[in-house]
């Protein structure tokens, strides 16, 4: 994508994730704005990008990514409002911040897209739920989708579904790591050394994920194929059910969506 200039406001976990993925996919011109000087210098050194204050970083940028905490989005939008190109597209990755909130802080007609990423984007395996605001042209949406596809898969969804997207894919990697922690702990308790338990859990999650992603079968059917009658898996799943693991996970996903909704009400 020649002539593309991306400005990333906020050089934390998600800002770095996207910068890293875009550098790996060949994007040349990236500027970051990050208030902590040491952190900004680290990103400049690591990814060969430029660093500037927010107003300078967005000047001339075609795509501006807001990767600050949800409660900082409105003030950052106000801060850059006078410096954005009229044809720029602003992509916010903040949980719970609506396109309407951002549009109200920016000049009329500026294109705003809300995107919910996840951290596997750092290895090009991200999942993004994307919702255009009221002033986004189809070319601008295509540009954002193409850019994000450099870091993973993209689903364009109605903005009303963004809290649910956050609850499944945005926060989802943490659920998988939580499962990995429990599997490793359980393996150690059953007699493995930690590095071996970790290796077994890692490859099992990788293999099972690839199988699930490439299969026409439902997760329930794939699980059934592991579960021999009255065998070892049956013992594990029966215990999970008895102890409410499935219900607990469903309740956690619902709590995540509710928290995303709460953020969209007051941003804090
Ligand atoms: N981490 C994840 O897995 C995901 C995160 N998100 C969203 O991404 C956003 C960022 O999250 P994450 O990267 O985890 O958070 P971080 O706290 O790691 O990053 C936010 C960064 O923005 C910086 N910042 C604060 N104010 C400004 C400002 N005015 N101008 C420029 N930079 C500023 C912060 O600096 P300082 O620390 O000094 O305040 C910090 O470095 C959030 O809105 C979150 O909802 C979405 C999906 C997944
Ligand atoms: O925990 C959070 O609030 C952010 C949004 C989704 C993943 N991390």
Image (cartoon, rainbow, N blue to C red):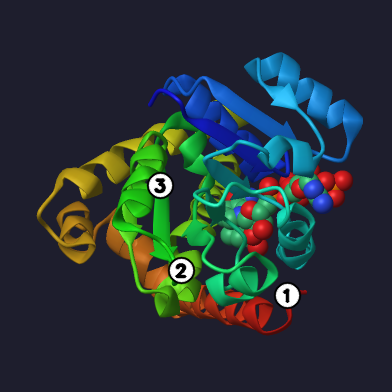
Q: Residues within 10 Å of mark 2 (few under 14, many from 20)?
A: many
Instruction: Please tell me whether residue 3 is drawn above or below residue 62 in the rendered image.
Output: above
Nearer the observer: mark 1 or 3; the answer is 3
**SS at mark 2?**
loop
Residue 204's quadrant in the figure?
Answer: top left
Residue at numbered disc 3: 144
The residue most toward the left is 216
Ligand 2 position by quadrant: bottom right
What is the count of numbered marks?
3
Residue at numbered disc 2: 133
**SS at mark 1?**
loop
Q: Residues within 10 Å of mark 1 (few under 14, many from 20)?
A: many
Q: Is residue 246 at least partly visible in the picture?
A: no
Instruction: Please tell me whether residue 94 is drawn above or below residue 2 in the rendered image.
Output: below
Q: Position of residue 185 (x, y in %)?
A: 60, 46
Decide which of 86, 161 is in the foreground and name it: 86
**SS at mark 3?**
helix
- The answer to whether residue 67 is left or right of residue 180 is right
């Amino acid at each position: 994508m020649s002539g593309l200039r991306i400005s990333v406001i906020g050089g934390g976990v998600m800002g770095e994730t996207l910068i890293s993925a875009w550098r790996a996919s060949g994007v040349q011109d990236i500027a970051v704005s990050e208030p902590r000087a040491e952190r900004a210098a680290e990103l400049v050194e690591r990814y060969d990008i430029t660093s500037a204050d927010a107003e300078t970083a967005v000047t001339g940028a075609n795509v501006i990514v807001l990767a600050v905490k949800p409660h900082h989005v409105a003030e950052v939008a106000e801060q850059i409002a006078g410096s954005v190109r009229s044809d720029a597209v602003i992509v916010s990755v903040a949980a719970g911040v609506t396109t309407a909130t951002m549009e109200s802080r920016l000049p009329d007609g500026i294109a705003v897209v809300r995107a919910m990423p996840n951290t596997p984007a750092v290895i090009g395996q991200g999942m993004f739920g994307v919702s255009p605001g009221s002033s986004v042209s189809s070319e601008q949406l295509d540009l954002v989708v193409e850019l994000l596809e450099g870091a993973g898969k993209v689903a364009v969804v109605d903005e009303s579904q963004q809290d649910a997207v956050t609850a499944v894919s945005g926060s989802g990697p943490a659920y998988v790591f939580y499962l990995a922690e429990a599997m490793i702990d359980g393996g150690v308790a059953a007699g493995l050394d930690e590095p071996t338990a970790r290796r077994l859990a890692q490859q099992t999650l990788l293999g099972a994920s690839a199988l699930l992603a490439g299969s026409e079968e439902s997760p329930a059917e794939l699980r059934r194929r592991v579960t021999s009658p009255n065998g070892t898996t049956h013992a594990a799943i029966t215990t999970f059910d008895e102890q409410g693991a499935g219900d607990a996970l469903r309740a956690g996903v619902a709590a995540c969506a509710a928290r995303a909704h709460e953020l969209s009400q007051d941003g804090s």
